Amino acid sequence: MEANKIKELTHKMESLSIKEGMGLLTDLFPGKVGFSTSLGQEDQVITEIIARNNLPVEIFTLDTGRLFYETYDLLARTIVKYGVDIKPYYPETQAVQDLVTKNGINGFYHSIENRKSCCYVRKVEPLKRALKGNSVWITGLRAEQSPNRENMQLLEWDEGNQILKYNPLLHWTMDEMRSYINNNKIPYNPLHDKGFVSIGCAPCTRAIEPGEDPRAGRWWWETSQKECGLHEQEPQVANKS
């Protein structure tokens, strides 16, 4: 999608509510808008908005096979509460077998390269399958989550996946998000109350200490940009010419 068209659409959407913004995108791209949920607090907010307003958005999740029990339980509770379909995407069996054979069941602890290989097999490749055929990818990214996300835009072109990415909660604060969850009685992962801010796979996530960066609990044994590859691609942002 051309940068000037993204800029025009961004200008139009900046004055819209999240419900109105998603509604506009589903009108512009009927049947081609998907939302990826990892069942985090941000994603639960977006799921509630989609469900409450009966928006024609496909909701999907990436089941890596190594998630916390609490995440699976929340998935089940969310489907029941909101009456929505949340389609799971799984890694390819042969790819997982090859990965484990080569690196070991917990090989991701041994190097950043091994960890990124695991993330690719369990998350990035399934995401590409999930997004195939869609024109818009809705995410729960917030700018204050990490330095890598501070420069993201409300709307941006994801070059790696060749798709328009919409980040409706981009400028929400943690307090705003928690207030919305409490006011609307939205179910959330109980691990959030135990110091887990960003929740991914069980072997790769720990609670953070007071004052630590929100992403410190992800891949806690390494010093890196703390991304799995889902959002690493350099975006074509709306203000580019």
Image (cartoon, grey):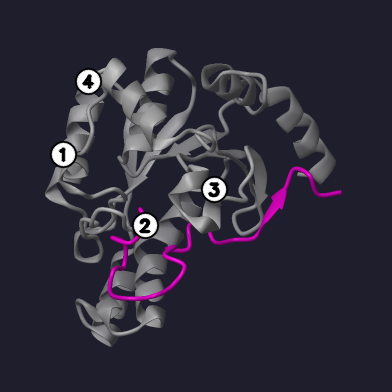
Residue 190 numbered tag:
1
Residue type for callout 1? Pro
Q: Which mark is first along the chain, 3 or 2?
A: 3
Q: Which mark is first along the chain, 4 or 1?
A: 4
Question: Whole-percent x and y of residue 106?
Answer: 21, 77
Secondary structure category for the residue under label 3:
loop
Q: Nearer the viewer, mark 2 or mark 3?
A: 2
Q: CA distance from mark 2 to mark 3?
A: 33 Å
- Crowdedness near tag 3: few (<14), some (14–19) or many (≥20) residues, C-alpha within 10 Å: few
- Crowdedness near tag 4: few (<14), some (14–19) or many (≥20) residues, C-alpha within 10 Å: few
Residue at horizontal 37%, vertical 57%? 213
Residue type for callout 3? Lys
* Left or right, 136 with reference to 219: right
Residue at horizontal 24%, vertical 27%? 79
Quadrant where the N terminus is found in the figure:
top right
- Residue extent of the magenta highlight: 214-241
Q: CA distance from mark 1 to mark 3?
A: 32 Å
Residue highlighted by disc 4? 81
Q: CA distance from mark 2 to mark 1?
A: 20 Å
Residue type for callout 2? Asp
